Image (cartoon, rainbow, N blue to C red):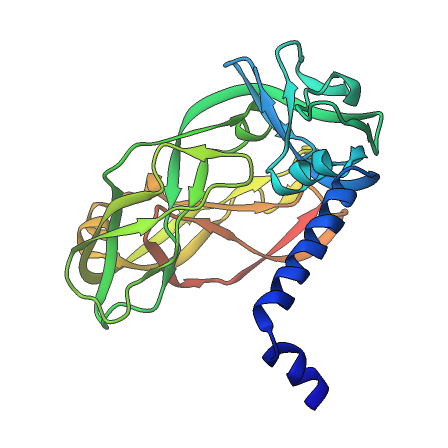
Amino acid sequence: MRIFLNFFLIDPIRKILALIFAFGLWFFVAIDTNYLYTKNVIINYTGLPESYVLVDSLSQIRVTFSGRGRALFNIWASPLRAICSLEDVRVGENDILTKDLNLPVGDVNFTYEKKSFSVMVDEKLKKVVKVKVPIRGQLKEGYSISGIFVFDTVIATGPKGILKDISEICSESLDIKNQFTTFEKEIKIYPPPHIQLSTYVIRIKIEIDTTMERVFTGLPIKLLDSRKRQVSPRVFSLDTLLLAGARQRVAALKEDDISIRINISSLKSGEHSLPAEIILPEYITPVYSIPRRFRIKIY
C-alpha cells in the first residue's frame, strides 16, 4: 500500500505527464492499425409516395466495418444511419437489396449481415371513426346514462388493409361512480397498431337522467333459420318485457325499436328449449322477461 501511495505522492506531476504521453503513443499506434468492428445501424426510410403507408419494415441492420482505428472510432462515436429509398415500391411485400442502401461512412469497407430484407407497403386510407367509451363504476342509485356525445371529429389514417375493417376505436375507460348530473370531460383515445389519429384527446359530454322502468307486452319474436325448415309454433311472442333506462329515452321508446329473435340455423331437427336474444337501443337494459325460454320443434 505504501508503495502504491508513494507512486502518486512523490513527484506526481512528472508521473502524470508520463502516463499521458504513454497513452498518447498507444492511441497513435492504435488508430493507425486495421480493425473489424460490428454494430447495429438504424435504417431511415425515405421517398415513400404520399398515397402509400409503411406497414412492416426492418428497423435496423447489423453491419461489420473494417478499416483503420481512427475511421472506426468515428463510426463508433457517431449515430450512423443507413438511408433506404422507397420511391419505387409497390403495394404488398417488397424486397430491398442491402447493396442499394446509402450508408455514408467514407473510406471504410463494410458488409451487411443480410443481402436483402423485405418491407410491407399498403395504400393509405383516411376515414372518420366513432369513439367507443368504456364505462366503469355505477351512477348514483336511481340515475341512468341518457347518452355520451363526442364533440370532436376523429379522423384515422393508416393502411387500407387494416383500416377498412375499423369503424370505431376505444378510449380510456370513464369512471362514473356516484355521478348523478350531466358533466363534460376530456379523455384519451388509443389507436390500433399502424393507425394514426387526427387527435388523441377528445372532449365528451355524459348526459345523465333519472331512471325509468317501462313494461312492454306481446312483443313478436323472429325466428332466424338459414335452412328455412318447418317449425312449431310458427308464430310466438314475448309475454312481458320490463326495461329500464334514462327517463327521456325510455319514454320515447317504441315497440319497433325493440328486436327479439332466436337463431336456430345451427340446430338439428327435434325439440329445443331456447332463450331469446333481446336487442335494444343504447343505454336501455332489460330488467326481466317472461317467459325466459321457448319450446320450439324443428322438423
Residue 94 in view (yes/no): yes
**Residue 74 figure quarter:** top right
* Residue at 49% in and 21% down: 125
Check the image and name the residue furthest to the left.
181
Check the image and name the residue furthest to the bottom.
2
- In this view, the residue in front, 44 or 174, is 44
Which x, y percent locates residue 202?
A: 29, 43
173 left or right of 113? left
251 left or right of 268? left
Check the image and name the residue furthest to the top.
88
Which x, y percent locates residue 224?
A: 59, 39
- In this view, the residue in front, 5 or 204, is 5
* Residue at 44% in and 46% down: 190
201 left or right of 238? left
Which x, y percent locates residue 261?
A: 52, 45
Residue 230 in view (yes/no): no
